[in-house]
Image: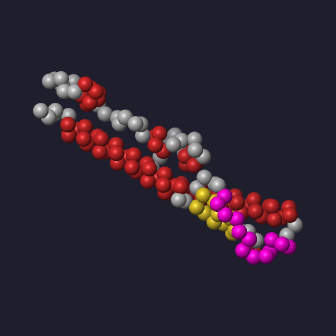
Amino acid sequence: MPSPYDQQIEDLLEQYRRQREEAAETRRRINATTSTATAPRQTVKVTVGAQGEVTAIEFPTGAYRRMAPKELADVLLATLQQARSEALEGAAGVLAGELPPGVTVADLLQGRVDPGALLPEDPAMPDSVRDYVDHGFQGETHE
């Protein structure tokens, strides 16, 4: 015998599944975000991922050969910072309007918050439905 809660339970579970799938897709899109910055005179070219990890360093021209080590180091650091900043902006764009209050893009990107943790394993539902799920239909409704 179907319960009066069956459709409500199915709707809640479907909504919950969609939210978890959306969170996983957002995580994939963030992980796919990269940025490449090139220094003036094309001395160095740096590519970083969404979390700021360096994925490539290139020297497109021979200009670096004429630079003092300190000058090259400064250019490399500045180019890294630029690429990281752009990658963070790209990831923030993916998340625009999607984050709950109190969670920042930086928290997510630096691994302080797992998007899956934003959605609990057990979906939120009214107490009466939770009671039904846990104990089955008892012949009376509890609101």
Give the residue drawn at x 80%, y 61%: 74
Image quarter in which the C terminus is found: top left
34 relative to 73 in the view: left or right: left
Q: x and y percent of residue 25 in the render? A: 44, 53
Give the residue drawn at x 40%, y 51%: 22
Q: Is residue 1 visible?
A: yes
Q: Is residue 96 visible?
A: no
Which sits in the foreground, 98 or 125? 125
61 relative to 30 in the view: left or right: right
Q: x and y percent of residue 21 in the render? A: 39, 49
Q: x and y percent of residue 108 in the render? A: 55, 46
Q: Residue furthest left?
A: 1
- The figure's colour scheme reads secondary structure
Using the rendered view, name the quadrant where residue 120 is placed.
top left
Query: Image height check: is 107 above or below 65?
Result: above
Image quarter in which the N terminus is found: top left
Give the residue drawn at x 69%, y 58%: 81
75 relative to 20 in the view: left or right: right
Q: Is residue 73 magenta?
A: no
Give the residue drawn at x 75%, y 59%: 77
The count of marks equals 0
Q: Residue furthest right?
A: 68
15 relative to 65 in the view: left or right: left
Q: Which residues are magenta?
A: 54-66
Query: Image height check: is 110 above or below 38?
Result: above
Q: x and y percent of residue 23 in the render? A: 43, 48
